[in-house]
Amino acid sequence: MRISTLLSYAGGFKEAVAEVAELEKAGLDVVWVPEAYSFDAPSAMGYLAAKTERVTIASGILPVYSRTPSLLAMTAAGIDSLSDGRCMLGLGASGPQVIEGFHGMPYQAPVGRIREVIEICRMVWRRERVQYMGKHYQIPLSQDQGTGLGKPLKLINHPVREEIPIAVASLGAKSVEMTAELADAWLPAFYTAEAAADVWGAAIAAGNAKRDAKRPPLEIFAGGMVAIGEGLEHLRDLARPQAALYIGGMGARTKNFYNDIFARSGYADEAKQIQDLYLSGEKKAAEEAIPDEYLAHSSLVGPEGFVRERLHALKESGVSSLNIGLAGQTRAERVAQCERLRNLVDTL
């Protein structure tokens, strides 16, 4: 199992990259570079390429509404070249509040758009002349639009790889089905081994049934916070603020994808309660309403025996790579936790 983590640069970007370089030596395999509506991810990915040697550098995630498909392909090819073939293009739809509120683009047809973006990116990387007449993207632009002077072009540079891995962050059934059909990796949210089959099993199976047999199996990333040792169970509570934010306040009451997943994972009453509390301003109460059972099932926090059991459960549910956060007050503590996890994973 590969080990991945999200680049967190709340304490400073260059400090975060220096930590990734140490985590790489401790066994980290993939680093996800976030974007949301902060600094752009590709700039950080290029910097990481210069400061690391082995880790895969993945966008986590680039929303398809903020860039053209060709630019997404160019960006991934550029980072892949800088890193000697270590880029992974993470794509997603984000949500209407960010896309319409920050980018000023209508949040329409996310599944169809991602499908077409994937197809166009792979065409660009193969250095084909890009001619694509999709529902959402028409390249070149048809002559009845614009100047009528557009013509099919191909990428000038020769990419390091004709196939750059594409990861998709998807949640809904149709989106997950499309991910299993076309993508190389899947980045779910609020994943627990116990609920995975009920929540996503049918969508994954439907997508796999249409998957190109020549494409390797879908890589599934999930895991949770890591703190391996005796008497550390209280650290699971560190996940409460973010969980409450996503379940309770990420998106509108009627359109919160994370709340939907949490409800479908066996916590329907709790999902409603958390959202009600969060949207009424009672954020602390919303955090306290998150079930202890969920915090245990969605983490790798506890004695080595507990963590080993969780790793087996994740693997049996279909997870092939870990996506984790490292608990620890200092860089040294987080690096030590990564080493413990690496050693444990290598014994499975």
Image (tube, helix red, strand yellow):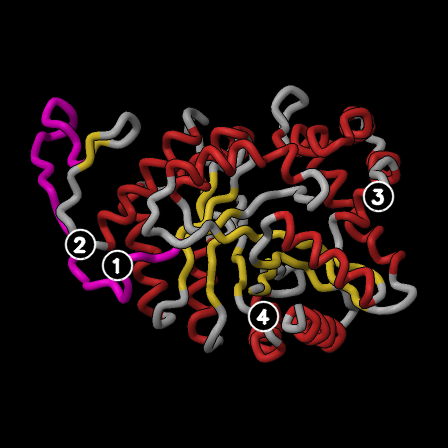
- Say if mark 3 contacts mark 4, CB within 8 Å: no
In the image, residue 118 sits, relative to residue 24, either above or below, namely above
Q: Main secondary structure of the magenta part?
A: loop
- Say if mark 1 contacts mark 2, CB within 8 Å: yes
Which mark sits nearer the N-terminus, 1 or 3? 1
Check disc 2 and give the amino acid type. Arg
Check disc 4 and give the amino acid type. Leu
Of all residues, the one furthest to the right in this rendering is: 231
Q: Nearer the viewer, mark 3 or mark 2?
A: 3
In the image, residue 116 sits, relative to residue 223, either above or below, namely above
Q: Position of residue 271 (x, y in %)?
A: 76, 29
Say which residue label 4 marks.
Answer: 28
Q: Residue at x 58, y 70 (%)?
A: 28
- Say if mark 3 contacts mark 2, CB within 8 Å: no
- SS state under label 1: loop
Say which residue label 1 marks.
Answer: 162
Say which residue label 2 marks.
Answer: 127
Q: Position of residue 205 (x, y in %)?
A: 50, 36
Residue 155 on the magenta span: yes
Which mark sits nearer the N-terminus, 3 or 2? 2
Picture quarter with the N terminus? bottom right
The residue range painted magenta reads 139-165
Q: Residue at x 54, y 53 (%)?
A: 34
Residue 8 shown left or right of residue 139 in the figure:
right
- SS state under label 4: loop
Q: Residue at x 47, y 36 (%)?
A: 93
